[in-house]
Image (cartoon, rainbow, N blue to C red):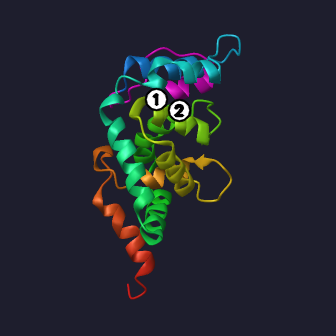
C-alpha cells in the first residue's frame, strides 16, 4: 500500500514518499506538512512557500545569469520566433515547466502568480545592474497581453531556448509541425 493510499484510508501514515525515485528530505518534509489531515497540524500555503526547499535560493545562483540572458534574447528576437517559443511553452511537460518555476518564483516576490514591473526591476537592478531602459524593453516584450504583468507562460516562453535549463531540442518540432501544413 502506498503512502497516499494509507493517508486517504486512515488519515495518517508513516514511511517515505520516495516511491523509487530520489526526493530530498526537505521536499518530503514539505509534502508531509501539507498532507496533514488536521488543519491545525497542516502547513499553511504561506509557510510552504517560505520553506527553504521551495525557495531553493542556493541552487539557483549559478544559472541566474543565464535566465537574464534568456530574457534579453527573447526581447531582441522578432515576433515570429517569440510566437514559436510561446507555442513550445504551452507544449512543455510538467517536469520541464517545474525547472523554470523556481526562477519565476524568485522574481514573483509577492507570490501572486505574476511578475510586476517593480518586481522585475528590483531583481534586475539589484543583482545584475541592468539599466532601467533595458528592463522596460524586457518587461514590455514579456507582457504579451499588455496587462502590466508578466504571466508564467510568458516567462516560460522566454526560458524555452535556454540550454542550461535542460529543455530538449525535440521541442522545436512542435511549432514546426503546426506551421508545416504539408505534414
21 or 5, which is in the foreground?
A: 21
Q: Residue 65: x, y in percent?
A: 33, 38
10 Å neighbourhood of mark 2: few (<14), some, or many (≥20)? some
Secondary structure at numbered mark 2: helix
| Residue at left offset 53%, top offset 54% | 142
Which residue of the protein is positioned furthest toward the right in this rendering? 39
- Circles 2 and 1: CB atoms closer than 8 Å: yes
| Residue at left offset 38%, top offset 29% | 19
| Residue 141 in sight | yes
Relative to 7, does residue 102 appear above or below in the rendering? below
40 or 45, which is in the foreground?
A: 45
Secondary structure at numbered mark 1: helix
In the rendered structure, find residue 126 and report the number of the disc placed on it: 1
Q: Residue 14: x, y in percent?
A: 48, 14
121 or 160, which is in the foreground?
A: 121
Which residue is label 2 attached to? 122
The alpha-carbon separation of the residues under discs 2 and 1 comes to 6 Å
Q: Is residue 82 magenta?
A: no
10 Å neighbourhood of mark 1: few (<14), some, or many (≥20)? few
In the rendered structure, find residue 62 and report the number of the disc placed on it: none
Q: Quadrant of residue 129?
A: top left
Amino acid at each position: 500500500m502506498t503512502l497516499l493510499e494509507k493517508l486517504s484510508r486512515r488519515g495518517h501514515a508513516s514511511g517515505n514518499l520516495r516511491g523509487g525515485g530520489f526526493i530530498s528530505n526537505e521536499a518530503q518534509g514539505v509534502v508531509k506538512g501539507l498532507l496533514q489531515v488536521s488543519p491545525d497540524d497542516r502547513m499553511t500555503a504561506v509557510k510552504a512557500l517560505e520553506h527553504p526547499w521551495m525557495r531553493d535560493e542556493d541552487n539557483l545562483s549559478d544559472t541566474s545569469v543565464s535566465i537574464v540572458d534568456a530574457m534579453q534574447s527573447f526581447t531582441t528576437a522578432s515576433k515570429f520566433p517569440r510566437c514559436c517559443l510561446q507555442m513550445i511553452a504551452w507544449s512543455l511537460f510538467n517536469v520541464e515547466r517545474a525547472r523554470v518555476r523556481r526562477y519565476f518564483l524568485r522574481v514573483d516576490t509577492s507570490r501572486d502568480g505574476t511578475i510586476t514591473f517593480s518586481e522585475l526591476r528590483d531583481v534586475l537592478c539589484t543583482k545584475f545592474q541592468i539599466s532601467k531602459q533595458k528592463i522596460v524593453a524586457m518587461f514590455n516584450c514579456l507582457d504579451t497581453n499588455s496587462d502590466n504583468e508578466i504571466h508564467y507562460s510568458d516567462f516560460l516562453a522566454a526560458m524555452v531556448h535556454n540550454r542550461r535549463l535542460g529543455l530538449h531540442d525535440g521541442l522545436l518540432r512542435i511549432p514546426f509541425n503546426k506551421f508545416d501544413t504539408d505534414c
